[in-house]
Amino acid sequence: MATAMAATAAERAVLEEEFRWLLHDEVHAVLRQLQDILKEASLRFTLSCSGTGTEAPAKQENFILGSCSTDQVKGVLTLQGDALSQADVNLKMPRNNQLLHFAFREDKQWKLQQIQDARNHVSQAIYLLANRDESYQFRTGAEVLKLMDAVMLQLTRARNRLTTPATLTLPEIAASGLTRMFAPALPSDLLVNVYINLNKLCLTVYQLHALQPNSTKNFRPAGGAVLHSPGAMFEWGSQRLEVSHVHKVECVIPWLNDALVFFTVSLQLCQQLKDKISVFSSYWSYRPF
Amino acid sequence: MRSSLQAVALWGKKAPSHSITAIMITDDQQTIVTGSQEGQLCLWNLSPELKISAKELLFGHSASVTCLARARDFSKQPYVVSAAENGEMCVWNVTNGQCVEMATLPYRHTAICYYHCSFRMTGEGWLLCCGEYQDVLIIDAKSLDVIHTFISSQSPDWINCMCIVHSMRIQEDSLLVVSVAGELKVWDLSSSINSIQEKQDVYEKESKFLDSLNCRTIRFCTYTERLLLVVFSKCWKVYDYCDFSLLWTEVSGSGQCFAGGEVLAAHRIIIWTEDGHSYIYQLLNSGLSKSIYPADGRVLKETIYPHLLCSTSVQENKNQSLSFVMGYMNERKEPFYKVLFSGEVSGRITLWHIPDVPVSKFDGSPREIPITATWTLQDNFDKHHTMSQSIIDHVSGTGTVGVTSSEHVPSLDKLICGCEDGTIFITQALNAAKAGLLEGGSLLKDSLPYKVLKGHHQGVTSLLYPHGLSSKLDQSWLVSGDQDSCVILWNIFTEEILHKFFLEAGPVTSLLMSPENFRLRSDQVICCVCSDHSVALLHLEGKRYLLHARKHLFPVRMIKWHPVENFLIVGCADDSAYIWEIETGTLERHETGERARIILNCCDDSQLLKPESVLVVASETHKHKSVEQRSSSAYSFGPIPCPGLQVESSCKVADAKSFSGPFKVLPVKTKWSNIGFHILLFDLENLVELLLPTPICDVDPSNSFYGSEILRRAKSTVEKKTLTLKRNKTACGSLSAEAQAKPIGENPAQGDNTVKFLEESDGIKRQKKTKNSKKMHPKPSRKVDANITVDAAKLFLSCFLPWGVDKELDNLCIKHLNILKLQGSVSLGLASNEDRFSLMLPGWDVCNDEMKTDYSKVNLFSKKVLDLSNKYTSTLPNQVGLPRGLENNCDSLQESNTLVYLLSRLFVVNKLVNMPLELACGTDRSFKMESVHNKAKSPGNEILTFSSFYGYLRNGKNESHIPEADISLLKLISCWRDQSVQVTEAIQAVLLAEVQQHMKTLSKTPVNSQPVPMTEDVHCEMRQILQNTEWTCGEEVELQCTTDTGPLQTPVSPVKHDSNSNSANFQDTEDMPDRCVLEESESPGISYFQICKWGVCYSLWSYILAVLLRKDSRKNGSLSTKPSLPFVR
């Protein structure tokens, strides 16, 4: 590279030959490798990328959620693809040790949007790659860079969907459809939120108590957060409420872990391919597109 | 872009890359709109003969454009909405390229449909959007707010494509969508408008699983109201809309992917592929009950099968296998065509005219439809090569070497350009621009001095002028980095290499400097970002490396400095953060995920390199944001050539903080291309300030650059003051330039009375000063920088004057204003209200149909300009033209006077036309600026303000004349803005009118000074009688009148003069010309009396200017108080 400019014609020819090899062979090798990895990743999302939804419904997995510190909340969540099909939550009330139990309605499922989005992003990436199979000839480095940028964008989004749960405000949680999923209905002093954080399925239960209208407490509604802390206040309906207790339980979903690793690996592969192309940038940048 | 900034683009020979990702033709079939991966939109003119020509490039998105759609009923408002990869949405007026509305939402759209139901809906209608989120968003087409969503009850998922079905039969509009998983869903549209407006949940009416993935298009056949065409990437299917039963499936051939389709007519469809082919099929009824699809158990009564009629394909060339985006426009109305269009990644547009009745060949084989037109941006550049001048063409000699990096040093008026072949040219920016643009520039070309620095062996990728960032550093230093990882420290004055650093880390992608608050043993350090993702720190004084951080796996996006603990924090593209200890060069920490985000957000004030820097050319708001950000250091004062944008930001256009002079060359680069173009920016406000022979000159007649630098600093102090709303009237140091200092004293919260009082006292003082200053004015003792200002002003006039309207006028301009004619039309820029702007492309002027007939006119923005100009002339008062009617023997002075006069005029016009937009932006955010609001909300009030000046003048200053016409002029301009006249149009019109006025005077003056002026006078008299009886008669009359009465209507003249309204003053008007002529013929030079008169006249305009400037500063304050910019997440 450093000698490219001063190189002799022979050296230049060799370099060009190398670049041609990169475009014609190496790129496709990397793309194939990428596709394999991503197909593996998308299998984890129980979505076979060639098949359709007519296949047998995705298998159900049960996850027992708990936390190491306390055992006040226990939850068993059943994940079916990207949807929560069943949920059983046991809550031991801290004051009277009364045990509360609530479960999902039979007829409803709760889509975990994070998983759905991640899955869709992966299939978009696979689609982008599939359009450039061996029969396709790359002509410029820029073309490869653009493809890699597009793929990396999808992969980064897929990963970020899993690594960054939505920051919701308490009224948003209260208004979400999740609270309406339970039968019998959730008591009014409880809020539930389910989300994915990295490779973990997390369940948070907020216990609320109403603030007296004449309370001397300074009412300040809390903003959006992944996990609200006790003392966070909000207004719901005509009532002012305050979070008194927060319980968070979680459980590792093994295949999410795999998927995240696949994402990281494929992102690195993409970047390495980009780097390889850019080494030759001084060549193709001279040429018209 | 700041409103007083006017831009002219110097494109160069090579068109900017435009990889088309979205394409549409507007309903009137006059414009093709394309969106690109680079983030720009391009408007292409489509002539009635289906000829394509690029017109305008719209800058507004910082990421790839994902989709385009109509945003209004096109016959009423020619608006188009564009959405980008990062959630930005813009609504553009495609006739003038203005950004009407913009928003950044956390959604990435892949398709948008405009829906409006006039009898059930108020407002401008909805944009139905789908993309990388569940279900369908409903966005208000006017405000771009999310109104509501269409929710699916069954398996909600991302939506791939959609279409709106207007069915005459069932009198109901429906929305048909297909999800990623291949599920077809139908929502009622027209009957759910009410529930949507009441924010009730609307669920789908029907849904059906279609059994294929990657749906690309869904279309309803409006001719039969029966068939539904669904195109998947690997097959296309035809369904019966009544019961969604499948009628036909056609699987794609080997390796082909379908990309879309459309229904041409009853039973005739067109399907196109990703590689640019299209096929027209006739769907034939078989009549037989073939049991192709017995899935639902019953035998279909009928089925259809396709018969290929015609096909199209793009030219067989080397780019053939690139991906295409295509569309089809079906117009049945007469002057319109049925057009199939495609856009390629390479930037090529191809059109096919589809015959009304496509037929196959006689033997039944498909017929090939020929390409009707094809065009690229580069074609435009090749065709109009005079307009595609690069700023450096003539310097580099061959003109073929691309400029890969450039830097403008305003303080030295130097343009430094690094080239592909490793040479660095240093030339005078202004002269280079002139040589590129103006006629007779060839003279300049030869004489243009330039230096060549030779030291790099490969293309120069980045340049940095450290003194521009921190005045403490040596003025002679220049740092450049190349492809070969070599960084050279130059002395630009002696042209010698001070030191060479070899980094061995791939091309140097950007050079940055540590902020002033970060010092390593009292010196600032240079930071080189290399393309192997490493970061090197260089110590210039010591000529040594400090650190080479090499462990980053992904490209560097952000660099932050931790001054206290001497840390360098590097943010990478994969959202990880690396913390390096500078002293020891060790990696202190490496974090990813949430923690990295926190680390990168923690020290905002020391941020240097902004990764996703939105494309901002000098936006006012942005400027203030940056001031706020950097308020801790003096760093924000100096001109900062924003260094960091190049790291993968889509288009690196530096922003306002780098702009602090009257003239600036801005290098622009687009993504994926190493060769950019330049934009010349003229700051009208600054030009006027610098040229205005008011106290500025008084204080420092030499008006050195240093002085203006102080001014600038003072100004930013002013802005900061208003920004923080400190009621501090001190500060501003020893600066005695009143025009600058005043806004400090003027607290934005003060009431009108105080303001007025200030203005009054201000005015009196200023008048005194003016007189004084005028006395010493004729001294030609101006330094180089003052010349630069004048030159910049002249260049500005050259660029904006519509040449060729009147040959005589051209010559007069060249002669008297001493400006040069343009070589050809220039590519003007148009700033939208905020940081969206458009640049004309070479050849824009031939796009306008009306202009095509007349080739003599150069640079005329639109036909409208002439009308506006005439209107303006007819309202032009007799009184204001101040330096008119002068003899020609004081050219230089007169010239500069005229310059100032014209520029100040233009500035006022510009302000007036721009005002509502700016205020509209500021209104919702500013909460403290009540006085400003009251004053400026309506144009009427504003005029009141102006008239109060005149009122003041009348009372306070010996009964001087109140120019009614002047107010009507202001009214006219305010009126223009309501008629949405573009700024450029207004400026051109006013400039033309003023110049015409002025030059006519000049051409007449010799006549006046002849010994027989009587005829003229009589003439004048008659005219005036005429005028009094017929006040509304044409401009000619008025012109004449103006000519003769111009110079005497100065406030100094003891005679009361009101020719327009009062015929009793006839005697006076008769007298005055004589006296004038007398004076003129007697005095060889400029008499003191005259100078005084001018001075006073100046002051009159300067009031308006002062108010505007002050208003500006107040507005700035108000703008800056807003919490955050909408486009920054």
Image (cartoon, coloured by chain):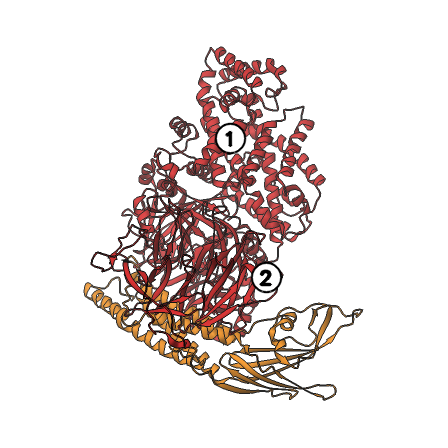
Chain colours: A orange, B red
Alpha carbon separation for disc pair 1 and 2 = 48 Å
Q: In the shown orientation, is residue A12 left or right of residue B719?
A: left
**Who is closer to the viewer here, A107 or B1092?**
A107
**Who is closer to the viewer here, A283 or B570?**
A283
Query: Which quadrant, please, contains the C terminus of chain B?
Result: bottom right
Name the subunit of mark 2: B
Image quarter of residue A48? bottom left
Residue B1010, given in percent of the width and then of the height, sits at 45, 13
Q: In this view, does B631 lie above or below A272?
A: above
Q: Is residue B432 above or below residue A95?
A: above
User: Would you say residue B488 is visible in this rendering?
Assistant: no
Residue with the most extreme left position: A10
Residue B148, given in percent of the width and then of the height, sits at 57, 63
Judging by the rendered image, the residue that carries numbered circle 1 is B871
Q: Is mark 1 on a helix, strand or loop?
A: helix
- For the residue carrying disc 1, how many other residues have a C-alpha within 10 Å: few (<14), some (14-19), or many (20+)? some
Tell me, yes or no, whether the two marked residues, 1 and 2, touch with CB atoms within 8 Å: no
Q: In the shown orientation, is residue B928 left or right of residue B16?
A: right
Residue B252, given in percent of the width and then of the height, sits at 31, 69
Q: Is mark 2 on a helix, strand or loop?
A: helix
Name the subunit of mark 1: B
**Who is closer to the viewer here, B177 or B284?**
B284
Q: Is residue B763 above or below residue B161?
A: above
Residue B522, given in percent of the width and then of the height, sits at 52, 62
User: Would you say residue B340 is visible in this rendering?
Assistant: yes
Q: In the shown orientation, is residue A210 left or right of residue B798?
A: right
Q: What residue type is labelled 1?
A: Lys
Residue at (51%, 86%) from the top-left corner? A61
Judging by the rendered image, the residue that carries numbered circle 2 is B196
